[in-house]
């Protein structure tokens, strides 16, 4: 197998090759580390590379194979972890100089479960400071560009994870999503990104378990790999109230045997609180949604009024950031990201009444979206209103679509993602094609609450109908490694 071929081999295939001794865990990990090293000056997708730890784990994985014992479903397969997620013995910086030398003494539950499945953690991927924006840049590490075009942004806040997947640096990547932070960069870089139902994957670091709108989730190149990660990470845990009592689902089977959608009804919503979507993006994503008609589904365009929840999402999120990180401003303010400082400063103007009203509005939104599924089995949207933004932009700049300045980024570039952080419904983004600028365009599929398997099934079916994995970004600097 060539190095390039191995770099883009799916986790499911790698795991089988390792089990059958076609390739060793040491070879796989060493190849990943070489590719990461060569890519860092170009893509800068990693804050920390856990070289020694990964090689030690690879040797242990090789020994386990030699002993002939039972192997986990991801035995020997490399994975990365976004640097907001705790990793035992490997620093977790949150993209901030404040936590530059923070080394947790235990893994997050999702990470521990991936390790238990046999996967090998190779490093921590880049994130903006505290994951506060869809631009993967921070004072600690600089900027992570898009895998397809270095003059465009990677998206965020799980931008490093998305670039690692797109560039063949790691087949499995752990991200987090507080307003679209898995789905935005996944869409911008042409990979699969899943925000599961609230509680499907326990989030033991969420300071507010009951009011949580932040999710840990998988970012991969294939739906099967996403299902494998989800199967390993999902399940109840005492630390997460939303995870308790959840019915177990077979996500791997859902991806392997998706069946058809005969008799199913799908809502197509080209707008979701926004007024403008790039015409090329709309045409590509609508064409992608129509693929489900080939599988027997009925696609119905819905154009009813939907008011963007971004204003009260902002109240909830900025108030949480101020509560968690505001005490660092006096000492660290001149070394923190200006857009993050602005975000937590804005929160000082929110009253207790505004915060409580935002909590009530979240419940209203949940009930509204829940009502969609009285009529429809799935809901589909574009994931982003246009392709990846230009690299000279930042959080408070206006979005421009087809020459028209249309307003703030959160409401107008990714209006399709943050509603489902608030409602908790499962949402997955999938590569749907490429725009004329050569950048990926993505389709989002949203499912019924707690029916993540149905979303995986639909995604796998789409992957069969419109395969995408044969196209990879042109990165000459790491070709052949």
Image (cartoon, rainbow, N blue to C red):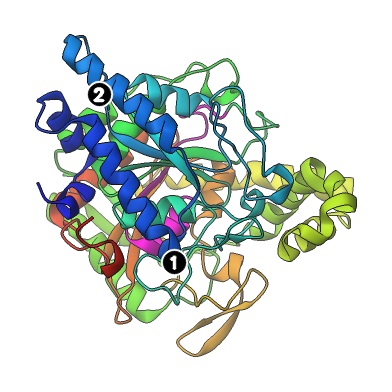
Label 2 Cα neighbours within 10 Å, binned few <14 / some 14-19 / many ≥20 = many
Looking at the image, tell me whether mark 2 or mark 1 is earlier in sequence order: 2
Does residue 177 sit above or below 473 in this rendering?
above
- Residue of label 2: 73
* 319, above or below 122, in the image: below
Decide: few, some or many residues near mark 1? Use Cα within 10 Å; few <14, some 14-19, many ≥20.
few
The structure residue drawn at horizontal position 82% and vertical position 61%, both measured from the top left corner, is 334
Q: Is residue 69 visible?
A: yes
Looking at the image, residue 62 sits to the left or right of residue 80; the answer is left
In-front residue for pair 127/369: 127
Can you give x and y, in whole percent of width and height, for residue 155 in the image? 49, 62
Residue at image coords 33%, 67% = 441
Q: Would you name the residue on which mark 1 appears?
A: 303
Q: Position of residue 461 (x, y in %)?
A: 19, 46
The magenta region covers: 182-203
On the image, the x and y values in percent for residue 419 come to 55, 52
User: Is the C terminus in the top left, top right, bottom left or bottom right quadrant?
Assistant: bottom left
Whether 193 is among the magenta residues is: yes
Q: Quadrant of residue 80?
A: top left
Any part of residue 301 in sight: no
Residue 469 at x, y = what percent? 19, 56
| Residue 206 badge | none
Quarter of the figure with residue 384:
bottom left
Queried whether the magenta region covers residue 125, the answer comes back as no
Residue 298 or residue 290, whichever sits in front? 290
């Amino acid at each position: 197998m060539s190095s390039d071929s191995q770099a883009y081999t799916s986790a499911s295939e790698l795991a089988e090759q390792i089990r059958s001794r076609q390739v060793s865990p040491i070879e796989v990990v060493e190849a990943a580390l070489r590719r990461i090293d060569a890519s860092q000056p170009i893509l800068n997708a990693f804050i920390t590379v856990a070289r020694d730890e990964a090689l030690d784990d690879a040797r242990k994985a090789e020994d386990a194979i030699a002993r002939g014992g039972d192997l986990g479903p991801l035995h020997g397969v490399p994975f990365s972890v976004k640097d907001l997620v705790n990793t035992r013995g490997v620093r977790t910086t949150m993209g901030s100089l404040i936590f530059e030398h923070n080394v947790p003494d235990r893994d997050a539950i999702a990470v521990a479960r991936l390790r238990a499945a046999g996967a090998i953690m190779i490093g921590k991927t880049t994130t903006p400071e505290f994951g506060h924006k869809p631009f993967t840049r921070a004072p600690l590490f600089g900027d992570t560009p898009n895998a397809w075009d270095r003059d465009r942004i990677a998206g965020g806040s799980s931008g490093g994870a998305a670039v690692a997947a797109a560039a063949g640096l790691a087949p499995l990547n752990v991200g987090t999503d507080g307003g679209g932070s898995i789905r935005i960069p996944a869409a911008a870089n042409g990979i699969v990104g899943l925000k599961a139902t609230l509680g499907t994957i326990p989030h033991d670091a969420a300071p507010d378990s009951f009011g949580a709108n932040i999710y840990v989730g998988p970012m991969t190149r294939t739906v099967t790999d996403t299902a494998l990660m989800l199967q390993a990470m999902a399940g109840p845990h005492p630390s997460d109230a939303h995870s308790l009592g959840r019915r177990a689902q077979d996500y791997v089977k859902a991806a392997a045997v998706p069946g058809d959608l005969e008799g199913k009804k799908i809502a197509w919503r080209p707008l979701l609180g926004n007024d403008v979507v790039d015409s090329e993006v709309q045409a590509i994503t609508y064409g992608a949604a129509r693929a489900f008609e080939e599988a027997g589904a009925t696609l119905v365009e819905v154009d009813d009024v939907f008011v963007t929840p971004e204003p009260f999402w902002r109240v909830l999120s900025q108030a949480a950031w101020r509560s968690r990180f505001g005490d660092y401003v006096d000492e660290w303010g001149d070394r923190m990201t200006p857009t993050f400082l602005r975000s937590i400063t804005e929160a000082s103007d929110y009253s207790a009444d505004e915060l409580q009203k935002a909590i009530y509005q979240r419940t209203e939104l949940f009930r509204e979206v829940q009502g969609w599924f009285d009529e429809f089995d799935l809901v589909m949207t574009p994931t982003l209103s246009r392709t990846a933004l230009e690299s000279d932009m930042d959080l408070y700049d206006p979005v421009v679509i087809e020459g028209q300045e249309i307003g703030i980024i959160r409401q107008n570039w990714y209006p399709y993602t943050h509603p489902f952080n608030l409602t908790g419904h499962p949402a997955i983004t999938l590569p749907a094609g490429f725009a004329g600028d050569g950048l990926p365009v993505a389709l989002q599929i949203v499912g019924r609450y707690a029916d993540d398997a149905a979303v995986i099934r639909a995604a796998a079916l789409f992957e069969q109908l419109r395969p995408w994995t044969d196209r990879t970004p042109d990165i000459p600097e790491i070709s052949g490694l």
